[in-house]
């Protein structure tokens, strides 16, 4: 069963330089909510940003992970 | 469950996407959504008084499988505007809040003003299209 901590570390490992905040939305271990910030998102559409995150999990989305609600944003470089 | 059937489903989905300016693939129907994310997306479209076609993906698992293969998007709902995937519930909600969705759909209304109107929230059933 996936948990918020493992989803966070997989996102951060899958998208170099990213940081993710993940919580278990319902407490049931299958609906998660993530806010992901990454340099790699710069210049990409929201669709492309979300796809990068979904690709890490492949078939698990819709399977063991029933829902992964995403908010993605490019990192701000001062 | 032959390859041919799956190709037919895929073609029907592609056709539905190209024939409808605004089309939502969802769980359940606009009147009776079967998932909170689908319900929220329908609510956003209705609050913008958007005309949209809807396809319930639940009756046959191959609909979702083929849709995701076409769109390269794993989750439901999926909203397409003028043939392009706009997003799922998160992106639609975010674009609604920023006003981008109203702009996108508003320009759609102007562009299709002379086209025959689709019934509000009409339900396109892929299975029926194949029979």
Image (cartoon, rainbow, N blue to C red):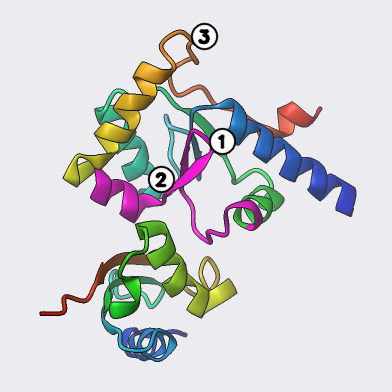
**Magenta region includes residue B25:** no
Q: Secondary structure at mark 2?
A: helix
Which-is-in-front pick, marks 1 and 3?
3
- Left or right, B70 with reference to A30: right
Which residue has dot 1 on it?
A: B55
- The answer to whether residue A35 is above or below residue B77 is below
Q: Earlier in the sequence, mark 1 or mark 3?
A: 1
Q: Is B100 in front, or is A23?
A: B100
Q: Which residues are magenta?
A: B69-95
Which sits in the foreground, B38 or B78?
Answer: B78
Viewer can see residue B50? no
- Answer left or right for A75 relative to B19: left
Circle on res. B38: 2
Q: Quadrant of residue A36?
A: bottom left
Same chain under badges 1 and 3? The reply is: yes
In this image, B6 relative to A7: left or right?
Answer: right
Q: Residue at x 37, y 89 (%)?
A: A16
Position of residue A42 relative to residue B10, above or below, is below
- B70 falls in the magenta region: yes
**Which comes sooner in the sequence, label 1 or label 2?**
2
> Residue A74: x, y in percent?
25, 71
């Amino acid at each position: 069963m996936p948990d918020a901590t493992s989803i966070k570390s997989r996102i951060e490992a899958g998208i170099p330089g990213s940081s993710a905040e993940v919580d278990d939305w319902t407490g049931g271990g299958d609906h998660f909510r993530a806010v992901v910030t990454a340099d790699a998102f710069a210049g990409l559409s929201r669709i492309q940003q979300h796809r990068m995150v979904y690709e890490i999990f492949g078939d698990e989305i819709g399977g063991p992970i029933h829902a992964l609600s995403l908010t993605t944003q490019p990192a701000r470089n001062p | 469950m032959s390859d041919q059937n799956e190709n037919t489903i895929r073609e029907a989905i592609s056709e539905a996407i190209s024939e409808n300016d605004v089309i939502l693939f969802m769980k359940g129907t606009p009147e009776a959504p079967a998932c909170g994310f689908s319900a929220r997306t329908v609510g956003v479209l209705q609050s913008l008084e958007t005309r949209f076609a809807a396809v319930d993906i639940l009756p046959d698992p191959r609909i979702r499988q083929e849709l995701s293969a076409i769109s390269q998007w794993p989750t439901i709902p999926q909203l397409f505007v003028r043939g392009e995937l706009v997003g799922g519930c998160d992106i639609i909600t975010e674009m609604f809040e920023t006003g981008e969705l109203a702009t996108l759909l508003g320009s759609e209304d102007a562009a299709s003003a002379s086209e025959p109107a689709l019934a509000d929230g009409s339900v396109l059933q892929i299975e029926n299209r194949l029979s």
